[in-house]
């Protein structure tokens, strides 16, 4: 019988420019690791966190809260111990909280022989997002659990659509080492948009989905435009406009804010172009005076993996 599992929990890019709170994609070379063990003792204990300063208390940790949501829905009488090895910094915009909350529920479901569907796991993991950001959004947790690109077509009822990944699509992400809390960067957003803005935005959402289904890289690039959130949030990110300009000049298909920032993502056709875009980003940020990491990653079609 399986009692213990070690997993890779992917980083994710939420929103993908035009799809605020509904679109997301999983990354392959950015992520955390977790070890989850079944215990006879009831409840969830977080026994170790390495890499970041985060609460061990179950009710204050996103992995703990997501795990408790699963336990509550389950008839399992025992409990779990969780170890978290963080590589993704909280407040980076690449789904740090989602990696932990999805990892917990995925591993628990695995050790219980998969009583819950992936959509049910998304619901449990959303409780972790509620703790982290004040809002139970699913655009990071859905791609971490399903892999590839996902669309949250509806929140009530939860309806998640799995979208195919074009073979040659790569992401390049720059993470400036400043922290932007999702809860804060949601507060600055406007809550109303005009019909004119809506028309432009849903045109791009449809275009992006069609581009992904058809592996039409130019259409993907043309659709990576955000008329609603980026004009407001980009002000918080040093040299956002320069990163965008230089990434596009280096061959990126499109560029936008990753989740609630400060990370900035681009998509490129082919690894060579994705690496060139990374070099262009590096040249811009070396002049900014803020530390940064750059990740070049294949799209992760599988989501969470056993390691
Ligand atoms: N859709 C969320 C937001 C993602 O932009 O606030 C946070 O990672």
Image: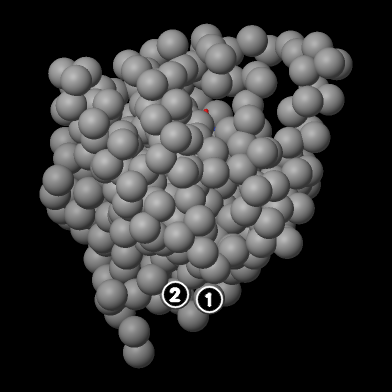
Q: Would you say 142 lies left or right of 81 here?
A: right
Q: Secondary structure at mark 1?
A: loop
Q: CA distance from mark 1 to mark 2?
A: 5 Å
- Scheme of image coloration: one colour
| In the rendered image, the vertical position of residue 287 relative to residue 160, given as above or below | above
| In the rendered image, the vertical position of residue 230 relative to residue 109, given as above or below | above
Quadrant housing residue 2: bottom left
Q: Which residue is mark 1?
A: 114
Q: Secondary structure at mark 2?
A: helix
Visible in this render: residue 10? no
Q: Would you say 144 lies left or right of 56 here?
A: right
Quadrant of the rendering where the N terminus is positioned:
bottom left
Quadrant housing residue 292: top left
Residue 209: x percent and y percent?
72, 50
| In the rendered image, the vertical position of residue 271 relative to residue 16, given as above or below | below
Nearer to us in this view, 152 or 36: 152
Q: Residue at x 27, y 42 (%)?
A: 279
Q: Residue at x 17, y 49 (%)?
A: 49
Q: Which residue is mark 2?
A: 110
Residue 288: x percent and y percent?
21, 18
Circles 1 and 2: CB distance less than 8 Å?
yes
Quadrant housing residue 203: top right
| In the rendered image, the vertical position of residue 278 relative to residue 216, given as above or below | above
Q: Residue at x 31, y 68 (%)?
A: 7
Disc 2 packing (10 Å; few <14; some 14–19; many ≥20): some
Nearer to us in this view, 222 or 178: 222
Q: Would you say 218 lies left or right of 86 here?
A: right
State whether label 1 is within 8 Å of ligand 1: no
Residue at the bottom extreme, as displayed = 1
Visible in this render: residue 25? yes
């Amino acid at each position: 019988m399986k009692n213990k599992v070690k997993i890779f929990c992917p980083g994710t890019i939420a929103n993908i420019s035009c799809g605020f709170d509904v679109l997301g994609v999983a990354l392959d070379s950015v992520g955390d690791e977790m070890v989850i063990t079944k215990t006879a003792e009831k409840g969830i204990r977080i026994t170790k966190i390495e890499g970041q300063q985060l609460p061990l208390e179950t009710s204050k940790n996103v992995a703990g809260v997501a795990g408790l949501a699963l336990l509550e829905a389950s008839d399992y009488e025992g409990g779990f111990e969780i170890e978290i090895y963080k590589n993704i910094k909280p407040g980076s915009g690449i789904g740090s909280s989602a990696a932990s909350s999805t990892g917990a529920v995925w591993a628990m479901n695995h050790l219980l022989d998969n009583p819950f569907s992936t959509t049910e796991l998304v619901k449990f993991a959303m409780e972790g997002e509620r703790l982290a950001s004040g809002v139970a959004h699913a655009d990071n947790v859905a791609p971490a659990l399903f892999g590839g690109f996902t669309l949250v077509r509806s929140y009530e009822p939860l309806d998640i659509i799995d979208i195919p990944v074009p073979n040659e699509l790569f992401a390049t992400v720059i993470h400036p080492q400043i922290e932007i809390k999702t809860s804060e960067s949601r507060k600055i957003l406007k809550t109303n948009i005009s019909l004119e803005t809506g028309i432009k935005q849903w045109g791009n959402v449809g275009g992006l989905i069609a581009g992904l289904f058809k592996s039409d890289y130019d259409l993907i690039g043309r659709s990576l435009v955000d008329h609603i959130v980026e004009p407001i949030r980009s002000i918080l990110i040093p040299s956002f406009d320069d990163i965008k300009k230089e990434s596009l000049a280096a061959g990126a298909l499109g560029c936008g804010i990753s989740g609630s920032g400060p990370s900035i993502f681009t998509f490129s056709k082919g690894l060579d172009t994705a690496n060139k875009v990374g070099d262009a980003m590096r040249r811009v940020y070396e002049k900014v005076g803020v530390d940064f990491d750059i990740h070049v990653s294949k799209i992760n079609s599988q989501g969470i993996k056993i390691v």
